[in-house]
Amino acid sequence: MKRFDILHLKGIRSQITALVAASIIALHVIITAVFLLERSGPPEFENEPGPAELFTAVQILARAPVPERPRLMADIARGFPQLAIKAYSGSLPGPPEPQSPHGFIQRRLGPSYRVAPLPPDVEVHGVVIKFPDDTMISAKMPLHHRQPPFWGNPLITTVMFAVIIVTLLGLWAARALTAPLSSFAKAAESFSLDGDASALPERGPEEIRALARALNRMRERITGLIDDRTKMMAAISHDLRTPITRMRLRCEFVEDEVQRSRMLADLDQMHTMLSSVLSFLRNGRKLEPMTLVDIASILGLVADQFTDMGYTVSYVGPGHAMATVRPDDLLRSVTNLVENAVKFGTSATIRLSVLADDMTIDVEDDGPGISDADKALVLEPFVRGDQARNMDEATGFGLGLSIANAIVAAHNGALSLHDRVPKGLIARIRLPLLHEPLKAAA
């Protein structure tokens, strides 16, 4: 790393350093501004009524003729008894403190007047004022200090502004640094193999941009691997179907009826296996749009199809139940469950129940069931439930339940297996009626 990379503000370290520096500068600016405003503010006693009234009374007495002053002082004493203005014949005390109320009166009257404090009183400030013509009076200045609001204190104001500015800068920095990470989490949740998701935006600090580039490349590699796998299996399937077709034609020339039927059954089983593998690999690559359909009609159609093929399958549930789903995918998942049910049992029942927030589809059979230890295992790809169902011959790759599980997961639902009383299995699909953005079934 270069020595001065921190000055480019590309990495998290440099941005945090810049944030700390900006906070320090902002604090210094705020403290300086508060200090200057405090110094340039009005004098402490500018708005006090006592000093202002005394200043006005002194101005009136100073401008009046000397013979008229006793009468004026009596009138002022009656109008403003709190001032207690009267003639003073004693000696003039020492000068006042500049920051005291006496000093405020001295500054307002000017250098031609002399102002001196009397011994302090608990409630009021006594003062002696000497006029330019050497006349002296004494008075009292009642001070009514109002408690300033807590934010009026310069220290409190500085702390408040400091906390606010640091908090705002911290929130901005946290959002700027965590927003890309949040987008990564959303992208991971919505990742699908259908190619519809957009690439991660490469923004933010250099470390975040490097991570976004790496994740985008990883997504491209994963998608490429899945595409190559699907193409390879499609090619294998295409190449195998041709010799299977030739073998089927040659079987027609086999004179032994029993051997011919067995060979054709084996060829049909091979064809079914290849089709199921290709169906599983292609699952989730191209999603059909969500459509408002009648779920009861779909389940009734599945029951009718299996009944027409000679199986005992019935539908139990409401006559109509509207929901937003992918109808072809849902039909396929229920069909897979019913196929398993009639394969391992003598009959199957499709039950539908609709609640306020979700709906439940149960596919029940009367077969041997599956042990609790194998229930979660058989939902995985390429795992057969033959041993659990006591089958002597394998008839597939064990992809029916895994395909149904992927389709249900793409609807933000859940597929689970339960025991049926007195015997059998219940494959339960729970689907929400209100959907969030859906992910691919992969």
Image (cartoon, grey):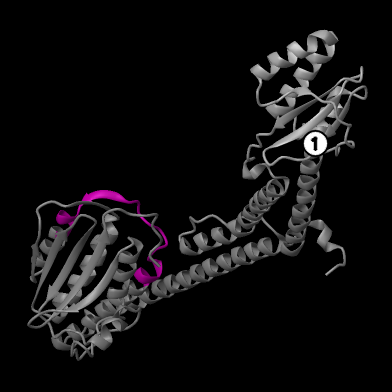
User: Which residue bears the numbered disc 1?
Assistant: 118
Q: Nearer the viewer, residue 354 or 415?
A: 354
Residue 213 visible at all: yes
Residue 47 visible at all: no
Could you tell me residue 11's position as x and y percent? 74, 62
Q: In the rendered image, which quarter contains the N terminus?
A: bottom right
Crowd rating for badge 1 (residues with CA inside 10 Å; few <14, some 14–19, many 20+): some
Q: Nearer the viewer, residue 309 or 136?
A: 136
Q: Amino acid at mark 1?
A: Leu
Q: Nearer the viewer, residue 163 or 442?
A: 163
Is 296 within the magenta?
A: yes
The quarter holding residue 398 reads bottom left
Could you tell me residue 280's position as x and y percent? 36, 71
Could you tell me residue 40's position as x and y percent? 81, 34
Q: In the rendered image, which quarter contains the C terminus?
A: bottom left
Task: Determine the residue located farthest toward the front in the rendered image.
Answer: 89
The residue stretch that appears in magenta:
278-299
Q: Nearer the viewer, residue 367 or 420?
A: 420
Is 114 within the magenta?
A: no
Image check: 255 left or right of 137?
A: left
Residue 25 higher or lower than 311, as above or below:
above
Image check: 196 left or right of 165?
A: left
Image check: 61 left or right of 163?
A: right
Assign a secondary structure to mark 1: loop
The quarter holding residue 210 reads bottom right
Residue 345 higher or lower than 105, as above or below:
below
Residue 296 higher or lower than 117, as above or below:
below
Residue 159 higher or lower than 63, as above or below:
below
Image check: 78 left or right of 335?
A: right
Could you tell me residue 272's position as x and y percent? 28, 75
The quarter holding residue 368 reads bottom left
